[in-house]
Image (spheres, rainbow, N blue to C red):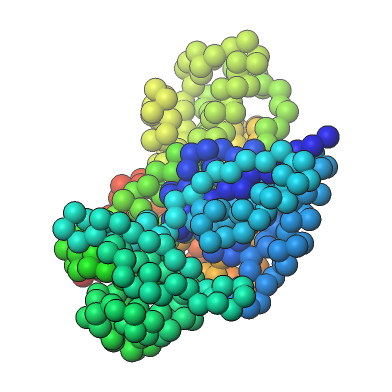
Amino acid sequence: MSGRVTLLGAGPGNPELLTLIGKRRLGEADVVLYDRLIDPSLLSFTNDDAALVDVGKMPLRHKVKQSQINEMLVDYANSGKKVVRLKAGDPYVFGRGGEEAQILQQQGINFEIIPGITSAIAGLAAAGIPITHRDFASSFHVITGHHKKDGQQLDWENIANQEGTLVFLMGMAQLPNICHHLIAHGKAMETPVAIIQWATQWRQKMVSGNLSNIVELVNKNGLSSPALIVVGNVVKLSKQLNVAKPLAGVHVLVPYSKGQRLFNCLEDLGATADFYQRSIVESVPAKLPVLDSYSSILFDDYLAYKEFIKLLTASKKDIRALVGKKILAGNQSVAKHLATQGLLVDEVVTTTKLSDDVLEVGGQNSSYSHKEFLSLYQRKEQTHELPFDLEEFNAVIFPSTASLRDFKSTLNEEQFKQLKDLTAFVMGQSIYDLATQNGFKKVINCQPNIKATIEQVKEELASE
């Protein structure tokens, strides 16, 4: 049985610049082979059973040889797997996508190409530089910064005399040579140049100058690979067109969710948000108790309520079975969620002890000193470690105690040590208490809603 290989472009960095079909293919994949420059948050779009294989290659230090990657693609596909080869940028722009496609075609493997947004265009736009402009450049030319295999030089005479914008990819090691050859073949020394490092990401940096001084400016400001080299008069537009946002340069971890409300709010304010994975929720077989035995029903969380409604329906009942019962919530957030479903809470519980005529509905474990507990779901921890260095983040957000526990379950020993330098924004006192117990030195208690939490993040982290 033959599977399928998808050569998928991840885009320039920001996970929201992945195409819709690319996200769908990640969700369908049995195996994902990914490069080092992709944003690890993209792996959150995979299904829980997918095998994730890091084949990332560093300049001059290849983690996995290209020949091995080719073999893996063929072998996985021949075993019937749906394989995604996740590559930074676009598979066919100065990558090995074309070579991989040739191998797959020669081996009779079913394959497809899904383009990605190339950094040669998106990276410039992220820094306020239009690659073309009617007053400055009517064409653009994308050039590899690497030498040719046979050692031959690029056609500098032709390149230097082009009218439009020049964009060099993978060329930082050759920056002095690029500037030298452009000047030697006719480009004016005053021609504007910009270097954009980590385009579209929280750590994006840019230095602009001209062909005569850009090397000195790059060294002074410490820029290095991965970066774009942009040569042309369009660079002049950056100061005018570079959009300033209050959370630019801020890097935040948020829980993965299908709605992505936290993620979207942060990104709209200029922050870079990445995901930590949530645990997998599995329903627990249960029998509906005799509800007439209880005067009150307590819902530990909103998920417990949803599972309870499923159990009611399976028992040929509906929400009318709660008529006459006092409805309790474990916290204010649960109360608000229940209100959106038309169920108003009579009381938010503030004690740890409950009377015997209260039925607690929750997950795997009771949250109270109580024997009348109906367990409706359990959480299965993620098997994948958190793929980030926590020193790269300003903060992490926890909407619930469950999200904090899920986060902890993905950490390795080194990441645990890094918690002391990471600010935690939490939505409620119980989460605050748990965060302080688990190594966070700075914990900020927010109102239990997304809007208030985002305002708190802005207050703490927004640049002046």
Nearer to the camera, 143 or 224: 143
Can you give x and y, in whole percent of width and height, for residue 124 in the image? 33, 61
Position of 41 relative to 463 (above/below)? above
Asked whether residue 245 is in view, the answer is no
Vertical arrangement, residue 325 with respect to residue 27, above or below: above
Residue sitting at x 58%, y 48%: 8
Q: Residue at x 44, y 55 (%)?
A: 118
The x, y position of residue 126, in whole percent, is 32, 59
Query: Which residue shows up at 78% across the image and 55% down it?
Result: 71
Question: Would you say residue 343 is visible in this rendering?
Answer: yes
* Screen quadrant of the C terminus: bottom left
Query: Furthest residue to the front?
Result: 157
Location of residue 281 (image quadrant): top right
Q: Is residue 152 left or right of residue 111?
A: left
Residue 446 in the image: above or below residue 364: below
Q: Which quarter of the image is occupied by the N terminus?
A: top right
243 and 382: which one is in front?
A: 243
Residue 70: percent from the left, percent from the top? 74, 56
Against 298, residue 317 (above or below) is: above
Left or right: where 99 falls relative to 437: right
Residue 227: give x, y in percent of width and height.
Answer: 43, 71
Count of numbered tags: 0
Name the residue rendered at 60%, 18% in the picture.
312
